[in-house]
Image (cartoon, rainbow, N blue to C red):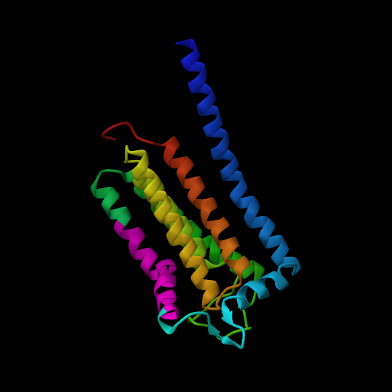
Amino acid sequence: MIARLKSLARRLEARTLAVWIAVAGAPWVFLAVADEVGEGDTASLDRRLLLAMRAAHDPSDPLGPRWLEESMRDITALGGFTLLTITAVVAVLLLVFHDRRRAALILGSTVVLAQISSELLKAVYDRPRPSLVAHGSIVYSQSFPSGHSTLAAATFFTLAAVVASAETKKQTKALIFVLAILFVVMVGISRVYLGVHWPTDVLGGWALGASWALVAWVVLGLTKPRRGA
């Protein structure tokens, strides 16, 4: 019995340590990327990666057939303000209807804070959008960090944590998080493919959004209600 308790304690300590490393690591990644961007050290890499998604003979032409370009516009909409706002509102209402008000508050707050922080940081860093190629999507704000990537990471990861918390099967939990990661990655790639963001804008957005999602995950765990609460 004592051996089992010690083993359980070690697993819990390792899990807790991993969580806190992730919580501290995501903001560190954002600050590290922001520092490099601010100093202009990523310009060459950003340029190469952006042009790698364009035809060598014509930078205005994205790689692949026309249907792929149209598909990328559809995918980028998954990280758009309108769709994610609708998704968040519906999710919050469903959680309230299922008497999970704490989770609803956490999800709603995370999405709002992610959006606000993204807009504030865009104003702070004031990075121009890429001008190497024609934009494949309409843009209204500055480039760093990517708002689509930030909001997608914050919304999908937090939503995945909330949904997974109600699941008992490990396979289902894993599938939920895999799908969330897939959506977030696809949105980020689509922003670079359409020429509206530098790759480091997307990386910064992922780190910022993941930071908010990790905070939400910790708060969700700390305030996890008892059965029926």
Position of 134 compared to 78: left or right? right
The part of the chain drawn in magenta is 68-90
* Viewer-side residue, 215 vs 6: 6
Secondary structure mostly seen in the magenta stretch: helix
**Viewer can see residue 115:** no
Whether the magenta-drawn stretch holds residue 86 is answered as: yes
Q: Residue at x 62, y 84 (%)?
A: 56
Q: Residue furthest left?
A: 97
* Residue 155, magenta (yes or no): no
The residue drawn where x is 57% and y is 44% is 22
Quadrant in the picture for residue 145: bottom right
Residue 33 horizontal/vertical position (percent) = 67, 60
Residue 59 in the image, given as x and y percentages of width and height: 60, 85
Image point (66%, 68%), residue name: 125
Nearer to me, 69 or 97: 69
Is the N terminus in the top left, top right, bottom left or bottom right quadrant?
top left
Of residues 206 and 147, the one drawn nearer to the viewer in this rendering: 206
In-image side of 135 versus 200 (left or right): left
| Viewer-nearest residue: 152 or 119 | 152
**Outermost residue, top side:** 1
Query: Would you place residue 34 above or below residue 92 in this image?
Result: below
Q: State the image quarter where residue 68 is shown.
A: bottom left
Check the picture and name the quadrant holding the C terminus: top left
Residue 123 location, quadrant: bottom right
Q: Is residue 163 left or right of residue 192?
A: left
How far across and how far down the image is residue 34, in percent?
67, 62
Q: Is residue 185 left or right of residue 82?
A: right
Question: Above or below — where is 39 with respect to 226?
Answer: below
- Look at the image and tell me whether residue 42 can be seen: yes
Give the percent coordinates (x, y) of residue 149: 51, 64
Q: Residue at x 56, y 62 (%)?
A: 205
